[in-house]
Image (cartoon, rainbow, N blue to C red):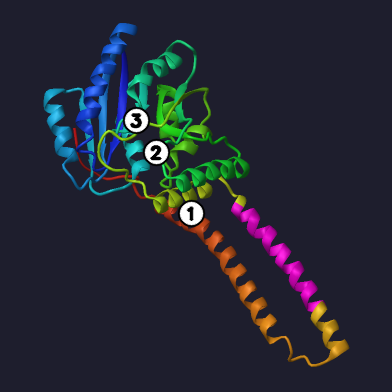
Amino acid sequence: MSLLSVIVPCYNEEAAIPFFYEEMKKTEEQFAARFSGVEFEYVFIDDGSKDATVEVIKKLREEDKRIHFVSFSRNFGKEAALYAGLSKAAGDYVVCMDADLQDPPQLLADMYAAVTQEGYDSAATRRVTRKGEPKIRSFFARMFYRIMNRISDIEFVDGARDYRIMSRKMTDAILELGENNRFTKGIYSWVGFSTKWIEFENVERVAGETKWSFFGLLRYSFEAILGFSTAPLSFVITLGFIVTVFAFVLIIFIVIKTLLYGDPTSGWPSMICIVVFFAGTQLLCTGIVGAYLGKTYLETKNRPIFIAREEE
């Protein structure tokens, strides 16, 4: 027998969970017809929901003992929820997927075949369209992946979802990375292992509303940049060199101009512009360095990634 653990991070998903569970029962029927000896377990992670998410999960568990859950003491974020799910999953194969059915369960059989029959360690999904998503959000998402692939040593696949299935070996490798500031899409690539990519078109949520705002995604992208690239620090060094050269040339220009034309008090507006320019540059560089120092400071605290209020 082979155990397949399905990890489902949830935040205010009381309306979507029943639909998800019904779809997964249909998926189990597909598995029974296609594969033999596959058992399912479900690990729901309640990320400090403010609605009745945990009550809905508990009710399902009364009907199906294959369902397990971890309920956080507060909202720790999706990255912490994924880590908690991976920690609790006992399966030979582990799949992460959202409860809103934007990760089509119909793909799971092909994903399972990729890791059990085709020799892959992981089968991951990526959206080839962003239908229904605001254009400005889609634009910045595409730009994010382009920038990350330029400044990072690992590959970031455009449109990649957290929806993927992994072997036990890959799952254990991810769990060895106990860092607090996590960006799981980058971690998947960093640990390596062979991955098959399965494409699908964007699917609308079955219920509820998205928990990701534009600025929330923007902060998330900064986490990725700080976690998987030191390019901003290189940018600071390069910018500092350019500004220094510019300042040196400007000093020579001012000295020569004063010797030739006198009146050293002229040019007050340009001087103010130069002072403001350099002050802004210094603040930018200090901010970038400070962001990396801040992440280092948080890691040295060695706080737990999540705190569970209850689990079964």
In the image, is residue 231 above or below residue 86?
A: below
Question: Closer to the camera, 42 or 257?
Answer: 257
Residue linked to disc 3: 97
User: Where is residue 119 drawn, in percent x and y?
Assistant: 49, 14
Residue at position x 43%, y 33% from top? Answer: 161
Residue 284 place in picture, x, y as percent: 57, 65
Report the amino acid beneath label 1: Thr
Q: Name the secondary structure under disc 2.
A: loop
**Disc on the earlier residue, 3 or 1:** 3
Q: Position of residue 19 (x, y in %)?
A: 22, 28
Q: Amino acid at mark 3?
A: Met
Identify the residue at image location x=47%, y=21%: 121
Q: Name the N-terminal-most of marks 2 and 1.
A: 2
Residue at disc 1, secondary structure = helix
Residue 107 visible from this viewpoint: yes
Q: Are marks 3 and 1 in contact (CB under 8 Å)?
A: no
How many angstroms separate mark 2 from mark 1 (CA)? 38 Å
What label sits on residue 296 in the rendered view?
Answer: 1
Quadrant placement of the N terminus: top left
Q: Secondary structure at mark 3?
A: loop
- Kindly tell me whether residue 92 is visible in this rendering: no
Segment colored magenta: 232-252
- The mark found on residue 132 in the picture is 2
Query: Splitting the image into 4 quarters, where does residue 109 fall?
Result: top left
Q: Main SS of the magenta segment?
A: helix
Q: How far across and down, in percent of the image, does residue 271 sit? A: 68, 82
